Image: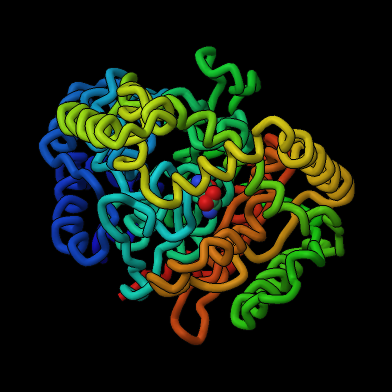
């Protein structure tokens, strides 16, 4: 059996007893990347030398008998939205193509403190806006289960690299489903922790009241391991929750007796793929056979979730992305060219004696902003900035943004009520398995509808996990979603582990 089939938890045991060194393990994964990533395209940046230097240092410290961190010697891939000091962080955007952060995100600091080996930065939709990774300015990522399929998004690279055994662990981010949907499409386990559980410091902002980093891995046990390493209160992130971090690795193997599962009827509506539906219903039976009590719950406002999310998230995005003005960060348009263009235009207007147009002309500053942003942002980012700016503008603010905030509260209250009666809500992560690359290019709305079952958790700020629960007739993985009340990640992990003890879907790998 190759080490590539080991879970991260198993690899950690091998590292600890010295059956394999961090350097050897890193080499195995680097070779796997070398061999497979040309076809998959999960990584934007792999720095073998950096990874091997870290691995060697960990091996030396282990030999010297030093106490090592939680992830000692495990390779971890990181979505290219988390700032890494001295190491390019592009966010999948031309805007940040050359951006080398002067500091590490808290998540990165924690990974380093846990003695993880940072193996590479993974591909993503530009600024995490999208559900297929096709919005990356740099390349497409292919689903390891079918190269003509999308891996999902925006953390498509993060999910694909785990599925293709190019990293045992990876960190993604989830604003509206971007960890869970790719995890579902790629047949891996991925968790969106409660808003505030993991620090957002150094996570490039898309929609600040939703963004949350979280783990992707082969099994719930591994998710527990990585979550324990990256979670925790952070005084430099004012939205980080000041609550203790449980030892997820200690509790994940404890089954939950009398687990109360809620099935939301709203999650089994029109548009649900037959293969997904039956796999999820089978999964519910597995839980029942383990003693779970299943009952129906209702989330009556979930039908407004997509509309609500696609008002609030673009509003926050339009405000967050205003910083990319060509002055503070990242790309700036060619100034000489821009000034020459302005002079040319002015001359033409002067010759024509067009006073009105002359007066309305851009100043060089405005022209610089305009050109910088039109050249460096892709179409989806522009669409979100326009939607958000519109919804926030005077006269529309109350009708759109404020209204959406009120609906967001109702969605949260639905969950509060449901979690009075059940421990977890169970259902599909996505309505369909991985769709084909290019399938939704012409239709942004159908791409938005992909987030039907995932955005509510972000609107409500609760925790949710996706785990593999079947394979469709076409040979594509199906994701099962479990949702829990805020800060109940332990319940999610324990239930997911229970399921993975009784089934082997999480061990299936693409050819
Ligand atoms: N697909 C959703 C969007 O495009 C979610 C993205 C995310 O979670 N980052 O906004």
In the rendered view, how is the structure colored? rainbow
Q: Quadrant of the N terminus?
A: bottom left
Above or below residue 61? Residue 412 is below
Residue at 83 percent of width and 55 percent of height:
299
Would residue 80 appear left or right of 313 to someone viewing this image?
left
Would residue 246 appear left or right of 37 to someone viewing this image?
right
**Residue 281 sits in which quadrant?**
bottom right
Residue 91 horizontal/vertical position (percent): 35, 40
Would residue 339 appear left or right of 178 to someone viewing this image?
left
Residue at 69 percent of width and 64 percent of height:
427
**Residue 17 sits in which quadrant?**
top left
Residue 484 horizontal/vertical position (percent): 71, 46
Residue at 19 percent of width and 22 percent of height:
64
Residue at the outermost left position: 49
Residue at the outermost top position: 235
Above or below residue 89? Residue 465 is below
């Amino acid at each position: 059996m190759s080490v590539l089939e080991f879970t991260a938890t198993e690899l950690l045991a091998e590292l600890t007893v010295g059956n394999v060194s961090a350097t050897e393990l890193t080499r195995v994964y680097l070779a796997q990347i070398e061999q497979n990533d040309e076809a998959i395209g999960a990584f934007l940046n792999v720095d073998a030398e950096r990874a091997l230097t870290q691995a060697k240092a960990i091996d030396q410290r282990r030999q010297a008998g030093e106490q090592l961190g939680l992830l000692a010697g495990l390779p971890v891939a990181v979505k290219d939205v988390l700032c890494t000091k001295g190491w390019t962080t592009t966010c999948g955007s031309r805007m940040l193509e050359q951006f080398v952060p002067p500091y590490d995100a808290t998540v990165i600091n924690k990974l380093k403190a846990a003695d993880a080996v940072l193996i590479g930065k993974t591909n993503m939709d530009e600024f995490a806006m999208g559900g297929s990774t096709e919005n990356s300015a740099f390349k497409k990522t292919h689903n390891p289960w079918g190269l003509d399929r999308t891996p999902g998004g925006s953390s498509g690279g993060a999910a694909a690299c785990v599925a293709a055994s190019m990293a045992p662990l990876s960190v993604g981010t989830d604003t509206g489903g971007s960890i869970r949907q790719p995890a579902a499409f790629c047949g891996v386990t991925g968790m969106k922790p409660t808003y505030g559980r993991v620090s957002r410091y150094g996570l490039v902002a898309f929609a600040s009241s939703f963004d949350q980093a979280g783990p992707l891995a082969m099994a719930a046990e591994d998710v527990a391991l990585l979550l324990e390493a990256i979670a925790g209160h952070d005084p430099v992130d004012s939205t980080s929750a000041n609550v203790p971090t449980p030892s997820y690795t200690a509790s994940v193997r404890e089954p939950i007796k009398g687990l109360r599962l809620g099935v939301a009827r709203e999650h089994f509506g029109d548009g649900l793929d037959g293969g997904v539906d039956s796999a999820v219903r089978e999964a519910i039976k597995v839980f029942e056979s383990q003693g779970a009590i299943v009952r129906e719950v209702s989330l009556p406002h979930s039908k407004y979730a997509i509309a609500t999310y696609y008002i609030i998230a673009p509003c926050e995005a339009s405000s967050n992305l205003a910083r990319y003005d060509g002055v503070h960060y990242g790309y700036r348009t060619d100034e000489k060219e821009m000034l020459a263009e302005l002079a040319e235009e002015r001359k033409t207007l002067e010759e024509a004696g067009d006073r009105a147009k002359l007066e309305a002309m851009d100043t060089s500053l405005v022209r610089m902003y305009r050109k910088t942003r039109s050249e460096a942002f892709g179409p989806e980012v522009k669409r979100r900035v326009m939607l958000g700016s519109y919804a926030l503008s005077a006269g529309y603010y109350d009708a759109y943004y404020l209204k959406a905030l009120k609906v967001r509260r109702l969605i949260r209250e639905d969950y509060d009520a449901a979690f009075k009666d059940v421990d977890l809500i169970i259902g599909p992560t996505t309505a369909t398995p991985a769709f084909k690359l290019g399938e939704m290019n012409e239709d942004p709305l159908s791409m938005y509808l992909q987030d039907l079952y995932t955005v509510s958790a972000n609107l409500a700020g609760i925790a949710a996990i996706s785990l593999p629960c079947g394979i469709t007739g076409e040979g594509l993985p199906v994701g099962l979603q479990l949702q829990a009340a805020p800060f109940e990640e332990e319940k999610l992990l324990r239930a997911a582990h229970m399921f993975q003890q009784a089934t082997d879907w999480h061990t299936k790998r693409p050819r």
